[in-house]
Amino acid sequence: MASLAHAGATLDRVMSKKTMVVATNSGWPPQSFLNDNNEMVGFDIDVSREIGKRLGVEVSFQTPDWATLTGGHWQGRYDVGVGSVTPTKSRAQVIDFAGIYYYSPYVYVVHKDSPLKSVGDLNGKVIGVETATTSEDFIRRNLQIDAPGMPPIQYKVEPGEVRTFADSMLPFDDLRLGPGVRLDAVIAPEQTALNAIKNGYPLRIIQGEYAFREPLVVIAEKGDSEWTAEVGEIIKSMKADGTLGTLTKKWYGADYSTD
């Protein structure tokens, strides 16, 4: 890990307060959500706590809306963002990417009784996505992932209508009502879809083809390169010693920590 003595103002603040404020989500299982005891739990929560542990500080959580989390200009309200954020070219203008900590395939989800069997069957259909996410960018054909070695995005669906929702579970709530009642399909992270199915949603994933596969990054406010590098070194060490692999297996049942 990089020397703490050479870190920037954010780390100075974190170390002096002995607390790191993490911006994340509160309604995105299994990444981050409130359990029955009103406690924040999930993969991103465990990752956040491990970063704090390796810094030797406590962790507290704030749950701004998605646009605020990814929009930068935090003005010291948060020290780091751990919310499964995709590194896109537009976001690179307003936030820094500390490092990739796992990868997520995005899938096409339909009702279990839907007659739709293939990706081609989705053309002209009503597709639901969470607003201001890469799912929406993808279905509107303007997704630009900012990460080395990413293959070109292939767009194979021309929707009849795109419906957007304020959080990750609302599209599934509409889809569960029945095939074509409100939605024909949803595009979402595989982990989120599998978690919904595990929790009784009558859905299935169209097999054989991902919509796209994306890296997810821990983010930081622009302008403090030392802090961004420090967090990046911690992420590298968590990947190298197997911690990230263990945490993805815990929450997702598979190792998503490597490309």
Image: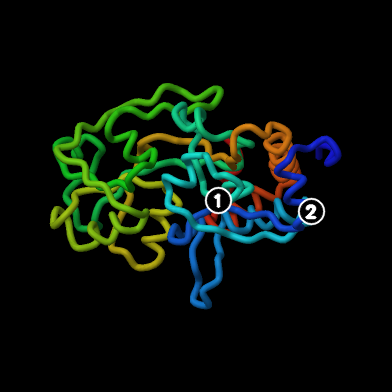
Q: Which quadrant would residue 3 be assigned to in this image? A: top right
Identify the residue at image location x=29%, y=51%.
165
Against 70, is 167 above or below?
A: below
Residue under circle 2?
16
Residue 109 in percent (x, y) is at 30, 49
Residue 55 in percent (x, y) is at 77, 51
> From the viewer's perspective, is 43 left or right of 8?
left
Identify the residue at image location x=55%, y=66%.
40
Exactly how many numbered labels are in the figure? Answer: 2
Give the CA distance from mark 2 to mark 1. Answer: 37 Å
Using the image as rendered, state which of residue 199 and residue 225 is in the foreground: 225
Identify the residue at image location x=72%, y=54%.
52
Residue 51 in percent (x, y) is at 70, 51
Using the image as rendered, state which of residue 96 and residue 185 is in the foreground: 96
Classify mark 1: helix, strand or loop: loop
- Specify the amino acid type for callout 2: Ser
Residue under circle 1?
254
Identify the residue at image location x=51%, y=29%.
92
Q: Residue furthest bottom?
A: 37
Q: Quadrant of the N terminus?
A: top right
